[in-house]
Image (tube, rainbow, N blue to C red):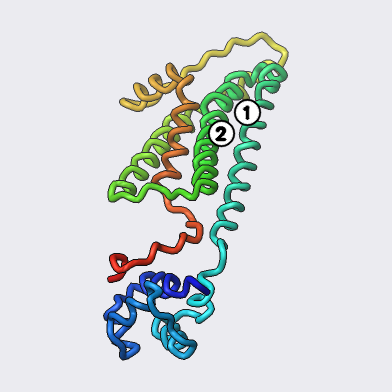
Amino acid sequence: MRDIGKNIRDARVKGGITQDQLAERLHVSRQTISHYETGHTRPDIEILEQIAQALDVDMTILLYGPPPRTDRQREIRHLRLCVVITVLLLAAYGASAGLIGDFSSFYGFFATLRSFILSPCACLCLGWTVFQACGLFLNTRPLDSPFRRWLRLVLFALLLIYAVLIVPFFWYQLRSSWELWQLQQSGDGYSFSSTFQLPGVLSFLFRLVANHRELLPPVFFIIGAGLWITGRRFRATPAPPVSGPNNCR
């Protein structure tokens, strides 16, 4: 209860109310509100009830502050979910290595699955999860900047372009592997040849990605981290602001 002044100020600022407006509602001077918030004077129970009504909050919030860290508990649940998804993707990446040897006719499909889908997705989730964990335990927040939304759109655009390049190639590899398997099961002599080609600039971008596939894991890790940094998340209960005359408005 010693932080009543801070709790009053937090509730007032959260409600978008100035000291002058609150003073007008309570029929007191702005200096009185300032003294309440800085702790120079303490309002009695009747005044607290009036302040709670004026700010449209429960009086317990003025007495004891907001409920403790409900948002933080939600963040912890989200972090656990991200960890589970990341572990599953890494496990699928490891398991797919054995499938390449067991199903040789599907080599191209599983190689594509590992290099261009499972590995990037796992690193994307890993980047998000690592930075989410750091933000949670270090009590930091995502980037708060006018450019945040644009940076986030750029990251989503990169993911969309990558999907446009890889999904057709993945489907091509699946179809080709299936046709090759059918030819192998027929028992007759066979020859199989096929090529994959994207139109225009997409073909150049695909070759660029394919020739530098070893860079995909760190790039997707950075994108995952960037999505968290530029994103919105549930914020932990903020520490009460330091009271003082300069903090009042």
Q: In which quarter of the image is residue 226?
A: top left
Counting from the top left corner in percent of width and height, residue 10 is at 41, 70
> Image point 51% across, 42% down: which residue?
134
In this view of the protein, which residue sits in the foreground, 191 or 71?
Answer: 71
Q: Quadrant of residue 126?
A: top right
Counting from the top left corner in percent of width and height, residue 158 is at 38, 36
Q: Can residue 175 be seen in this view?
A: no
Give the vertical position of 213 relative to 130 (above or below).
above
In this view of the protein, which residue sits in the foreground, 97 or 220?
Answer: 220
Q: Which mark is residue 122?
A: 2
Q: Please, what secondary structure does the residue beneath circle 2 have?
A: helix
Q: Please, what secondary structure does the residue beneath circle 1 have?
A: helix
Give the vertical position of 198 relative to 13 (above or below).
above
- Residue sticking out furthest to the front: 40
Q: Is 194 displayed left or right of 5 in the figure?
A: right
**Amino acid carrying mark 2 in the image:** Ala
Give the vertical position of 18 relative to 186 (above or below).
below
